Amino acid sequence: MKATTHTEVYRPYTGELRPPRWSFVPIASSGIRVALKSRWPLLLYLPAAIATVIFGFIVYAKFSLEQGMTPGALAGPNEQASAGVVLVGTMASKMIEVRDMIVGAIFALGLFSVLLVAWYGAGLVCEDRRVGAHLLYFSRPLSLANYVLGKLCVVGAFVLASVLVPALVICTVAISSSPGWTFLEDQGWILLHVALYSLVHTFVLASLVLAISTLASRRIFALIGTVGFFLFTQVLGMLLAFLQKDARWMALGPLANLRRVAATIFGVERVAGFRLNWDPALSWWALAGVLLAAWTVIVLRVKRMESLA
Amino acid sequence: MSTIVEATDLSRYYGPVVGLNDLTVRIEEGVTGLLGPNGAGKSTFLKLVAGEIRPSRGRVTVLGYAPFANREYFRRVGFCPQQDALYGEMTGLEFVAFLLRLSGFSRADANARAVRALERVGLADAMERRTRGYSKGMRQRARLAQAIAHDPRLLIVDEPMSGLDPLARRAMTQLFHEIAGGGVSILISSHILHEVEGLTRNVVLLHRGRLLAQGPVPEIRGLLSRHPRKVELRARNARALASSLLELDHVLSVRLSTDGGSVQLETRDLDRFWSELPRVATETRAGVQSLESTDASLEAVFDYLVS
Amino acid sequence: MGAFVSAAWLLFHTHLRRLAWSKRALVCALLALLAPLAAFLVASLGRRVGPADVAVHVGFLLQLQVILPVLALVAGSAAVAEEVEDRTITFLFSRPVPRPAVLIGRWSAILVFLLTLLAASTLLLLAASARAKGHGDAVDAGIREPLLVAVLLGGAVYSALFAVLGVFVKNPIIVGLGYAFAFEGFLANLPASTQALTIQFYLRSVVAALGSPAWNRVEGFASPSFDPLPKALWTLGLVLALALALGAWRIARREFVVSA
C-alpha cells in the first residue's frame, strides 16, 4: 500500500506573528513572586529598617525640638530611655538637614545593598542557563531586550525597595512632623532627589549583578563575584587614594561613586566617616563606564544564550 | 519468610505537608513493589527505610535495625536514590570503588568489586569514563552498581525506571530478576504499574501517605471480589445486549455508550458473568466484537483502590 | 575511632583530588590573585610608596580583612553544603561511616588547599610589594611573618566556621558574607571591647604581637587592647575546636534530605 500524506487539511499560517510588547512583565512578576517565597532573605532588609527607624527618629526629634519641645519631654517618663533620647535630641539639633539623614541612611546601608543585590540578582541569568530555562524562554517570541528587562526588574524591585522606602519614610516623618507642612513647601524637591538617586542606585547595582550573573556558571559563584567585585574595587580605591594621597582613586569603586553621586544629588558636602573630596563628575563618568561595560557583557552573553537556544 | 521491614504507626511530616500518615506495614523478604501515584509517600517511605530521615511519629525497623544514621545497618543495605546525582569528575569505576572503600573494603577489594558490579549492570565498557558524560540510563546503572557492589541483604531502589527507554527498562528488569535470584531482597518503588508487575506480585499500595492495600496481586484482586467489577463489551447490537444483561441478578448496572456501540457494566460476580455471557450473546444475536474486563490488570486494581 | 580516621582520611584525599580540578578551585585561585594584583598596582602606579607601606596596607586592608574571609567562605562552605546542593550526600550517608568523618575529612582537604592558596597569595603579595620603588622601610620579617601567620591561622579558623555553617544552614554563602562583612566588619572596627567578639581582633593581635611598628601606620589597625600572643592563639584554637565539635555534633543528627 502506498503511503499518503494529508497536508491538505492544514492551512499555512498567513498572519503576522507579533511578539507581545510587554513580555518582560511575566518574567519580572514571576521572578519577584519566586524570590518572595523564601522569607529568611527578607532579613537582609533588617538593617534598612533599623536605619530608617534611627534616622526617622532623629528627623522627628529635630522638628520637635525646633517647635520648642525639650529633649527631656521627647524622652517621656522612662528614665532609662531618656539619656539616649537626649543624646539623639542633641545630635538632631546639630544635624540640621533632612537630606543629611537620607544621605546618612544611604551611606550606612552601602554594604547591605550589595548583599541584597547579590542575593536577589546573582542567580537570575546563570541559573536559567544551568537548568536550561533559557531554552524555554527563547523558544517563545521573547526578545533579548524583554528577557533582560524582566530580569532587571526582578533584582531592581528588591534594590529599589531598600533605598527608596527608607528615604521616603524619612521624608514622610519630616513632612508630618514639620510645622504646617513647611518641609513639603520648603524642601519638597528632596522627594525628586530621592526618586532620582534611587533610580541611579538601582540601575547601577542591578546592571552590575546581572552582568556578573551572565558570566558565572552557578549562582554561588555569581554571588561571590558580586560581593567580591564591590569589596575589592572599594578597598583598592581606598588603598590607592590613601597611599597615593589622591582622593580621585576612590572612583575605582562603584559603591564609593554611588555615595559621591548621592552626596551631589542631595547637595551634601560632608558625611561623618566618609571621604567625599573628589570631583563628582569623575564619579558620574566612572559609573557610566562601568554601566557601559556591564551592558556590553550582558548583551553579548545573553545573545549567546539566545543563539544557543 | 522473615520480615525485613516493619513499620508501626509511622508518620513523617515536612512542616505542614504530610509525607506519610500513620502507616503500619510489614514487608517480608523477596521482591516488593511500592506503588502509588506521585505524592503517595513512596519516596518518603523509602527515605525512612534507607535511614535518610527519621520518623516524625511511630517507628520503623529494617532487618531489625532502626535505620537513621545506623552504621551497622548500612553494611547490610544498598540504596539507589531517585535523584540524578553522581560525582561528575569521577569515572564510573572510581565512583563505585570510592563508595566501597567508605564501606570498609580495601583498595584492591573495592576495585575488584566495583568492576564486578559495573559489569553486572552493563557498564563494563564505560567504567573508565567520567560519569559527567554518561547518558541517563548509564547514570541510573552507575547508581545501581554502587548499591549492589557490597552484596547487600536488602536493596532499596527509588523509581529506577524513571526516564529510561524501553530497552533500558527491560535490561533493568532483567537485572533485578538476577539480583533477586541471588537471594537479595528488593524494595522497589514506582508509579508505573506494569514496571512492578514485571518484577513481582508482592506490592504495597500507598496513596496520600496511607496504606491502601498490601500483598500478592491475586490476593488483592480476591479482596476486590466483594466489590463490583467492571466489564466493557463492543457489539453490533449493543442495545439488545445491554437490556438482556440487565436481567442477570448479579449485574448491578449497565451503561450504553453514546455511539450505541459498546456496553459498560458492573457485576458482583465476575465468574458467573463470564459463564453466562455466551448464552446471552447468542440469544440476543449481539455480535460481540470485543470484551475487556477493565479490572483485569494491576492498573485496574490500583485505579479501583485509589478512585 | 579507627573507622572515623580511615573514613576521614579517604574523604580527605578523595576530596582534595576533586577540589584541585574543580571550578570552585578556579574561583578561589582568581580571588587569591586579587591581593597580589592590588599590591602590584599600588606599588607601580603614580606616586612612589615604600615597600613596607604597600605590604602592610594591602596585607591588612585587603588580604586579612577581605580576601581571607571571602576565600575561606568559598572554600569552607563547600565542605558539606556542596554535597547537599549536589544531592550526592545520600551516597555518603548511606555508607557505614561516622557522619562527622564527612565534615572533618572534607574540611581537612579544604584546609590544605586553602592554606596552600593563601600562603602563595600572601607571598606573591609580599613580592609585589617589594617591587615598590618609593622611600621607606623594606619588607622585612616583622611584616612577612605576622602577615603569613595571621593569614594561615585565619584561613583555618574561618574555613572551619564556614564549613560548620554549611552543616547548619542551606545557604551558607549569604549568611557567611553577612557574618564576615556586616557582623565582623562592623564590630572589629568599633573602638570598643566588642572587638573581642571577632576573629579579626585575634588575627590583628597576632600581627601586633609579631609585627614591626610599620603595622601601626595602617589606618584602623591599632587598638589599645590587643590580646597577648598566647591568649590570641589560644582563643583562635578554641574557636576552631568548638566550631568543629559543634559541626560534628550537628551533622550526626541532622537530616539533609527534607523535601517531600
Image: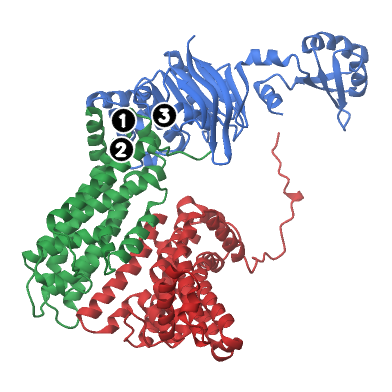
Chain colours: A red, B blue, C green
**B282 horizontally vs A44: left or right:** right
Expressed as whole percent of the image width and height from the top left, the position of residue B165 reads: 53, 33
| Residue under numbered circle 2 | C102
Expressed as whole percent of the image width and height from the top left, the position of residue C133 reads: 10, 78
Q: Chain of mark 3?
A: B
At label 3, which amino acid type do we have?
A: Phe
Give the residue at x 76% y 20%. Answer: B292
| Residue under numbered circle 3 | B68
Q: Are marks 1 and 2 in contact (CB under 8 Å)?
A: yes
Give the residue at x 71% y 33%. Answer: A1
Dot 3: few (<14), some (14–19), or many (≥20) neighbours within 10 Å?
many
Q: CA distance from mark 1 to mark 2?
A: 8 Å
**C103 horizontally vs B196: left or right:** left
Expressed as whole percent of the image width and height from the top left, the position of residue B66 reads: 43, 23
Residue C172 in the image: above or below residue B167: below
- Which circle, 1 or 3, is nearer the viewer? 3
| Residue under numbered circle 1 | C97
- Which circle, 3 or 2, is nearer the viewer? 3
Give the residue at x 59% y 62%. Answer: A29
Residue B109 in the image: above or below residue C145: above
**Quick one: SS at disc 3?**
loop
Q: Nearer the viewer, residue A47 or B200?
A: A47
